[in-house]
Amino acid sequence: MNFAELMNVRQSCRSFNPNKKVEKDTLLQIIEEARLSPSACNSQAYKIFAVQNEKAEIISAARVMGMNKFLKDCSSYILIAEDKYNFTAKIGTELFETDFRSIDIGILTANIVNAATDKNIQTCILGAFSEKEILKKLNINAKLRIIIALGYEIENYPHRKKSRKDRDKVVQYI
């Protein structure tokens, strides 16, 4: 699959197959590929946590206000947390008054979901989650920013038509 095909195929999955699990080696390969993502001053100011099996059930159960019920069938997650900057990135952040971690985490997240899609593994990026509950139950001391659910979709899961703004609404050629 080339990049254009990947971008057209990739979508958020909300119906994971509970009987087909992502292999540990595959999950680690996805992380390894995305770990090579660019970051401000090569600071890589994030921590990546791979969570599977019974520990994944903690995340599946830690829903906010009953949201994301589809997670009950998800058995693999990647958690991304903020980490400290290196010296150069810290100076750049102060100089430009921009916290580049959010940008770097966004780039990393995009590369994780694209690497997963390349392996026919579906994903859903989660921004609403019970951070305190997850951190406590997994015994992690971190500032979680994003959780990515990973798995195989159920059989006959529909491919949705992309709904995006028209190109002229978001692109200006100068």
Image (cartoon, grey):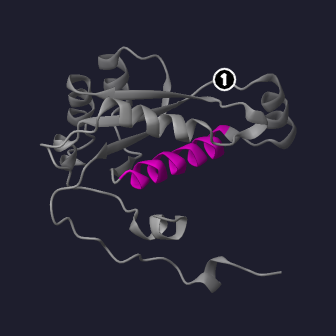
Depicted 50 relative to depicted 147: above or below: above
- Residue 145 seen in the figure: no
Q: Residue 74's image quarter?
A: top left
Q: Is residue 120 left or right of residue 143?
A: left
| Secondary structure mostly seen in the magenta stretch | helix
Q: Is residue 108 magenta?
A: yes
- In this view, the residue in front, 44 or 129, is 44
Identify the amino acid type marked 1: Lys
- Of all residues shown, which one is farthest toward the right? 95
Q: Which residues are magenta?
A: 101-119
Q: Is residue 62 magenta?
A: no
Where is the N terminus found, in terms of image quarters? bottom left
- In this view, the residue in front, 134 or 48, is 48
Depicted 122 relative to depicted 108: above or below: below
Q: Position of residue 16 (x, y in %)?
A: 20, 50
Depicted 22 relative to depicted 81: above or below: below
Question: What SS does tag 1 mark?
Answer: loop
- Residue 148 seen in the figure: yes
Q: Is residue 72 left or right of residue 173?
A: left
